[in-house]
Amino acid sequence: MTTAFAPSTPLSAVDRCDRCGAQAYLRVELTAGGELLFCAHHAREHGDKLREIAAHVHDETHKLGSTPATVTDSEH
Ligand SMILES: [Zn+2]
């Protein structure tokens, strides 16, 4: 593996889910290059598949403090 990427930087409010535009809590660095951002909802929805194609997954979904399934989702 060639992980010459910069160290993982924290996700912030300006990082948005590629699927729905909500705030991103998961960043996936692809083995093929590039990266994808996902909100907690889509991180859960695509989680297993993402880990198959990811070189590295930066997961901040724990920051939500509760399971995404029960969170009141104002941004979706
Ligand atoms: Zn999303």
Image: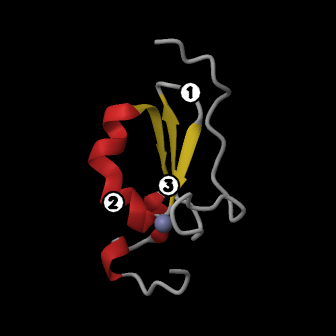
Could you tell me how many numbered marks the image carries? 3
Query: On the rendered structure, is 12 left or right of 50?
Result: right
Residue most extreme to the left = 48
| 43 is higher (above) or lower (below) than 32 | below
- Give the amino acid at mark 3: Glu
Question: Mark on residue 44?
Answer: 2
Camera-near label (3 vs 1) is 1
| 1 is higher (above) or lower (below) than 54 | above
Q: Residues within 10 Å of mark 1 (few under 14, many from 20)?
A: few
Mark sitting earlier along the chain (3/1): 1
Q: Residue at x 53, y 12 (%)?
A: 2
Helix, strand or loop at disc 2? helix
Q: Residue at x 63, y 24 (%)?
A: 5
Residue located beneath label 3 in the image: 60
Residue located beneath label 1 in the image: 33
Marks 1/2: CA–CA distance: 22 Å
Residue most extreme to the right = 14
Mark sitting earlier along the chain (3/2): 2
Helix, strand or loop at disc 3? loop
Query: On the rendered structure, is 58 left or right of 15?
Result: left
Identify which residue, 33 or 67, lies in the foreground. 33
Mark 1 near mark 2, Cβ–Cβ under 8 Å? no
Marks 3/1: CA–CA distance: 21 Å
Where is residue 44 shown, x and y percent of the image? 33, 60
Q: Residue at x 49, y 55 (%)?
A: 60
Helix, strand or loop at disc 1? loop
- Give the amino acid at mark 1: Gly
Q: Residues within 10 Å of mark 2 (few under 14, many from 20)?
A: some
